[in-house]
Amino acid sequence: MTISAPTLRTDEPASALLGTLAAQGATGALSTETGIVYLAAGHVVHAESAVTPDLGDLLTHSGALAPDGWWEAIDQAGRRCRVGRQLVDSGHLAAGALELCHLGALFDAAYFVLAHDGPALRFRPGAAHWLGAVRSVPVDTVLRESRRRRELLHRIWPESDVDRAPLARVPGPDAPDLPARRCRTLAQVDGVRTAAQIATALACRTFHTLVELRRLAAAGLVAPVAPSIPGPSSASSPAPAPASAPATVSAEPGPTPRPPAPDEPDTALLRRLLHALEAL
């Protein structure tokens, strides 16, 4: 791992490295197997993961911003790393609404970047995200929120393989009446999709999807698909096609667009706060 500060150890978990970088007031991008955390002067300014919707998805799906406004800001300011500032200056979005949605996307992605707290892959000193400065968050706050989310999921259902393995419905009687979001989540469980793929299909935050999936697992309605045991003839059989991996996080300006699908509870909250901020 290439880093500018000699005191960093490459065998430390990502959370420990973040703490060291924060103490040194570092600026750059820390990568793990599941995403990237961007730092400026020792504070977290953005996080992104291939298994969470990006900021553009959250803004446009909520109705807070038209897709044309999002892509216009990327075209005009992406190369200068000022997309957030462009959205506000152009009048497409109120500053408070941008900060609110940005923090939601940051904490959602940071949870998955740090979920298993494995070693970091690389630190790129001086690297900046194309979004630019919106709102910085102390590293301690990000780590504390990630722990809170991990503990919440553990309390709902302690088996973390639900988060990563393909999921299938458990045979049995019809499911009881479920809340709307949980019912939509259950409808996407097909024995093939993982939690991340289900969240993408629903176009909602992956952590929220994990909450619903663990509740479904606790209710005995879904379970991870058991890996198949190779038989005697498996050596002569062709290898199965690998499952499609999540898209890697692009370093180029602009996220990969996904088909819009609303996430009602988040949409309602964002709209109420947006209207209040605009009234002020």
Image: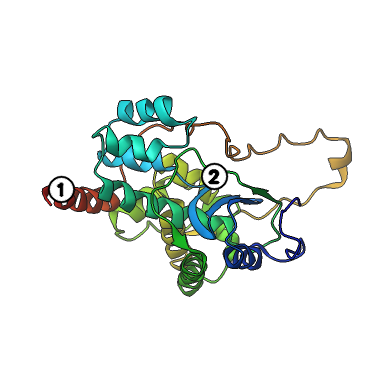
Of residues 95 and 200, the one drawn nearer to the viewer in this rendering: 95
Q: Is residue 139 visible?
A: yes
Check disc 1 and report its element: helix, strand or loop. helix
Q: Which of the two labelled residues, at mark 2 and mark 1, occupies the earlier sequence position?
A: 2
The quarter of the picture where residue 76 lies is top left
Of residues 99 and 5, the one drawn nearer to the viewer in this rendering: 5
> Mark 1 highlights which residue?
275
Check disc 2 and report its element: helix, strand or loop. loop
Q: Where does the image place residue 144, in percent across and percent down from the top left?
A: 49, 71
Left or right, 53 with respect to 232, comes to: left
The quarter of the picture where residue 18 lies is bottom right
What residue is drawn where x is 12% and y is 52%? 280
Q: Amino acid at mark 1?
A: His
Of residues 30 and 161, the one drawn nearer to the viewer in this rendering: 30
Q: Where does the image place residue 139, in percent across and percent down from the top left?
A: 51, 65
Query: Mark 2 to mark 1: distance in Å?
Result: 37 Å
Farthest-out residue, left: 279
Left or right, 39 with respect to 106, comes to: right
Indicate which disc residue 193 carries.
2
Q: Where does the image place residue 65, in percent across and percent down from the top left?
A: 27, 36
Q: Amino acid at mark 2?
A: Arg
> Label 1 near label 2: C-beta < 8 Å?
no
What residue is drawn where x is 42% and y is 24%? 75
